[in-house]
Image (cartoon, rainbow, N blue to C red):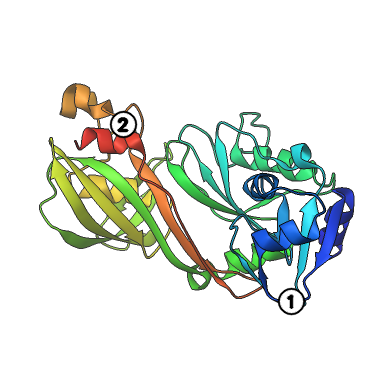
Amino acid sequence: MTQYSDYRKANHYTNYPVEQPAELMQFLMNRISGISRTKAKELLSQRMVYVDQEIVTQYNHPLKPGQLVQVCKNRHKHELKSRWVRLVYEDAFLLVVEKKEGILTNALPGDRRENVKAILDEYVKRQNKTFSVHTVHRLDKGTSGLLLFAKRRDVQQMLTSDWRGVVKDRRYIAVVHGDMEKDAGTVSSWLSDNKMFVSYSTPYDNGGKESITHYHTLKRTNGFSLVELKLDTGRKNQIRVHMQDLHHPIVGDFKYGSTQEAYGDRHDAAGRICLHAFRLAFRHPITGEQLKFETEIPSSFTKLLK
């Protein structure tokens, strides 16, 4: 908690103890002298208001006696501005972000390419120079969607040591080539890497890692299918390999079956790999609260299905 206290001091927050039940918007207007309703909305939308150490943007968030509302005086240092990353959720321990396709989650030592972790490190260092973020899980460079980072190493360890127990729901959406034969099904195999670090799948235990993917076909049109995917395991390239196993590779995935030889110009119909992590639900490692986040299906996916 020391880090969190330092963060509050460094960013010059004004404290407003809650003494009686109220909605957040009305509380701000009552407690901050001369503030207008428009200004109060601006404080919320720009993520400058904390309730008990968590950013709150909902105007009718209910307050209880004993809680603490804090308003940041230093807006510009606290904003995350990046064309690659959108901040979805933040508290004293965690960051949930939506990453765009085309950027690494984090880089290998010596790799200076822009990556999500570096962007978030810079963001939290503006709050306190000693801060950094810690990677909990990753998405491939070409995959977009929700990512979870920890603000403290001990929190990262809590999440990674019991990842399957902490995560309650993790789903992806994909556009694949062809009409899926089944409305729903499960792919189970063992995944390994060859000498070129390309993952491959076998139906028997070849010394690799057991991998299980559940799929549900949402739509078939224009020679494409929209598929929702849920993971029992989170192996490297698992979804991409399993869709190739079904002979319905993900559109734009040149590495795993979406080749020009097989599909002509349609192999890259969206200009990207059509895989997006749209849902993430997990138990907060500190508070025990059940958190759930969802994002929209990328417009480039829906255009293929019109």
Against 50, residue 147 (above or below) is above
Instruction: Find residue 64 and report its horizontal and vertical position in percent.
Output: 69, 76
Query: Could you tell me if residue 219 is visible in this image?
Result: yes
Query: Could you tell me if residue 261 is visible in this image?
Result: no
Against 108, residue 146 (above or below) is below
At label 2, the amino acid type is: Phe
Against 30, residue 265 (above or below) is above
Q: How far is mark 2 from mark 1, CA to CA?
A: 59 Å
Nearer-the-camera pick, 96 or 60? 60
Q: Which mark is residue 247?
A: none
Query: Which residue shows up at 60% across the image and 36% down it?
Result: 115
The residue labelled by disc 1 is 20
The residue labelled by disc 2 is 254
The kind of secondary structure element at disc 1 is loop
Query: Which residue shows up at 79% across the image and 43% down it?
Result: 125
At label 1, the amino acid type is: Gln
